[in-house]
Amino acid sequence: MVVTLNFDDFHPQSGPDGDFGGDPNSGTFRMILDLLEEFPGLRVTLFTVPSWQDRPYRGPSKWYHLKRALGRRPVVRGWDGEPFRLDKHREWCEVVRNRSAAGRLELAVHGLHHHNPNLVIHGQEFLGLDREETRRRISQAEKIFEEVRLPFVKGFRAPGWGYGPETLRALADAGYDFVGLFGSPYQLSKPGLIEGMVVIPQNYSIKDGADRALAVALRDGVVHAKGHTAYCYGRETIENGLSPEYFENLRNSLRALEAQYEVRYQFLSEYAREARASLASS
């Protein structure tokens, strides 16, 4: 039984607006490291934002939606000065790099800033961007990873799942190998190809329990477990953020899968490589 595990929004922020993995000794990052210690074969793919700028809306939600309806922009202001840019957190990058070198963590690209100031879903950075601007941001994101010597794979999930045809074409231009997509018309029940890139459907959320994981394994023959690093985001909560409760869900699900099957853990890049070969031969 192949099992993959991936999280969105990994970056060096940890504080009252959200714990996205900024402290290796506590919180989200510590929970991920605890999972790696308990399950020696586990591999984790982290969709990482190299210069996170998004921040939660601090006013009442009714004003948030009214502001958008009236066309008042920006709807949500981002952080000034790029405080979470990776090159400003080199010690954190060194910890992540060491874990990656040990073969336990894999970094994939999750946009550049994860922020669109003029949308209600203000994390949808790439929604509405043309091909040229999309390519520019992807290139800039890659340069930041390279500057801090953090290895990354050519895998991409759009912030806030905000895709358009130009996003996919720009990714293909940049030589990306796999993407994570949600929603019509791109959602597939099995791995497929879009613009030459492997699409990996996600079929299990960390908020669900072990019974759901076993049912997915029986139905699909593979478990792609998906979550977010942060659970609290200002006043909001993220549906499948890595809270203590969902951490226990995930632990129990992995234990149940190992009790039932001979589990083979894979990075998403490894799964994409095998899926591509299978699709080519079918």
Image: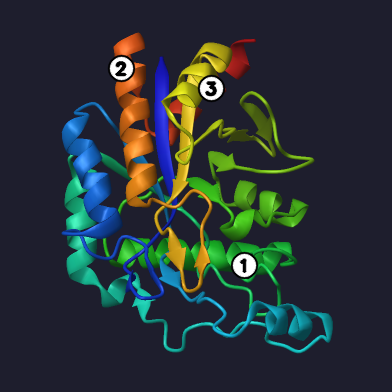
In the shown orientation, is residue 133 left or right of residue 55? Answer: right
- Which tag is nearer the camera, tag 1 or tag 2? 2
Q: Earlier in the sequence, mark 2 or mark 3?
A: 2
Residue drawn where x is 71% and y is 63% of the image? 127
Indicate the secondary structure of the residue bearing disc 3.
Answer: helix
Q: Earlier in the sequence, mark 1 or mark 2?
A: 1
Label placed on residue 194: none
Residue drawn where x is 51% and y is 14% of the image? 221
Query: Label 2 vs label 3: CA separation?
Result: 23 Å
Label placed on residue 125: 1
Q: Earlier in the sequence, mark 1 or mark 3?
A: 1
Q: Quadrant of residue 203?
A: top right
For disc 1, the neighbor class at 10 Å (few under 14, some 14 to 19, many from 20) is many
Residue drawn where x is 53% and y is 39% of the image? 177
The residue that label 3 is drawn on is: 275
- Which tag is nearer the camera, tag 1 or tag 3? 1
Label placed on residue 258: 2
Judge whether residue 261 can be spotted in this image: no
Residue drawn where x is 45% and y is 27% of the image? 271
- Which tag is nearer the camera, tag 2 or tag 3? 2
Judge whether residue 171 can be spotted in this image: yes
Q: Position of residue 149 (x, y in %)?
A: 26, 60
Q: Position of residue 27 (x, y in %)?
A: 26, 58
Residue situated in front as seen by the camera: 150 or 8: 8
Q: Quadrant of the C terminus?
A: top right
Whether 71 is drawn above or below 111: the answer is below
